[in-house]
Image: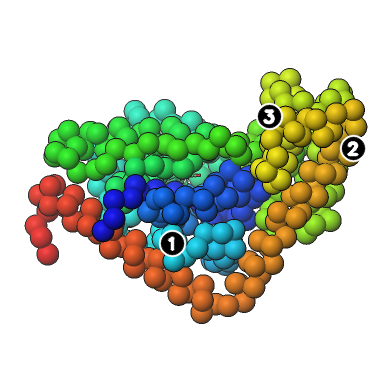
Amino acid sequence: MDNKKIILSGIQPSGKLTLGSYLGAIKNWAELAEEYDCYYAIVDMHAITVRQEPAELRRTTLEQIAQYVAAGLDPEKNTLFIQSHVSAHAELGWVLSCYTMFGELSRMTQFKDKSAKNSENINAGLFTYPALMAADILLYQADLVPVGDDQKQHVEICRDIAQRFNGIYGDTFKIPEPFIPKIGARIMSLQEPESKMSKSDKTAGGCIYLMDKPEDILRAFKRAVTDSDTAVRYDPQEKPGVSNLMQIYAACSGKTLEAIAAEFDGRGYGDFKAAVGEAVVETLRPIREETTRLLGDKAYLESIYKSGAERAARAANRTLQKVYKKLGFVAK
Ligand code: TRP
């Protein structure tokens, strides 16, 4: 075994992947494979805390695996798997829910947001979600957890749960750190640049999906909200729309924010928005084409998630057995 640090992250298959999840997460993950031992889960068990249409959930899960690979995650170098295929997640999730306090869970902002949005279905799973997420992370003894800003609180509660458990039973879990990328950490809605680009965004044109057609992408950027000024200048407070477009352009083109400001100095927003749209189209084109090709190759996709689950289960079961023993469960 080598001594690479371990990374784990996950994305819910509750809808199509967005430009935000690509630039903010997957694109950065692809660069970590040489240096770290990386596990990436498609967290279908988390997704059912909100009602899902079964056929749609199955479709988006497979599409998400294909997109992970198409976006550059080499399945030989990264362990790509579906959460429900590794039963240790459910098992450790239950154990950890017994070491997670009601009061702690009540403070989670995502729980408050999601229960406000789903007032007819505030189920126990939505509430205990952070215990399952802690299990996802702790099973692999992850050092680093790449997440967006909105998930920092969940990584913090995971650390608290791990420390509590270690305090009672002795060293069991590695204490993970959140790993928040500098560029693309927060891609915002094109229509409401004060809120994160999200698949639950209902405003037309606010969210770009990886599989969107080029003409739809160009149109969405043409209509992106800016401001009444004309300067392409990075200032997230005063100019959230323009700053978001600059971030997107920087992530897609590799240019710096300063170079972008210079490129569009005195040219107005029309040219700028068109250029951002073009850059996004060219970034997503190969990913969309490769995803479509992979979705046609069911046997290959299956071989990826099956071998991913086997590898993941090997690592996860090692931790789970250690935990069961410490708890006093009789060995099988
Ligand atoms: N809660 C994360 C989200 O909604 C998804 C997630 C589940 C996750 N388990 C994880 C992220 C483990 C990182 C690590 O975006």
Counting from the top left corner in percent of width and height, residue 102 is at 33, 32
Q: Is residue 304 visible?
A: yes
Q: What is the spatial separation of the Cα atoms under label 1 and label 2, in whole angstroms?
A: 42 Å
Q: Which residue is mark 1?
A: 77
Q: Residues within 10 Å of mark 2 (few under 14, many from 20)?
A: few
Q: Which mark is residue 194?
A: 3
Q: Is residue 135 visible?
A: no
Q: Which residue is mark 2?
A: 270
Count of marks, rendered view? 3
Counting from the top left corner in percent of width and height, residue 26 is at 55, 51
In the rendered image, which quarter contains the N terminus?
bottom left
Name which residue type carries label 1: Lys
Name which residue type carries label 3: Glu
Q: Is residue 6 left or right of residue 218?
A: left
Q: Is residue 65 left or right of residue 267?
A: left
Counting from the top left corner in percent of width and height, residue 178 is at 42, 36
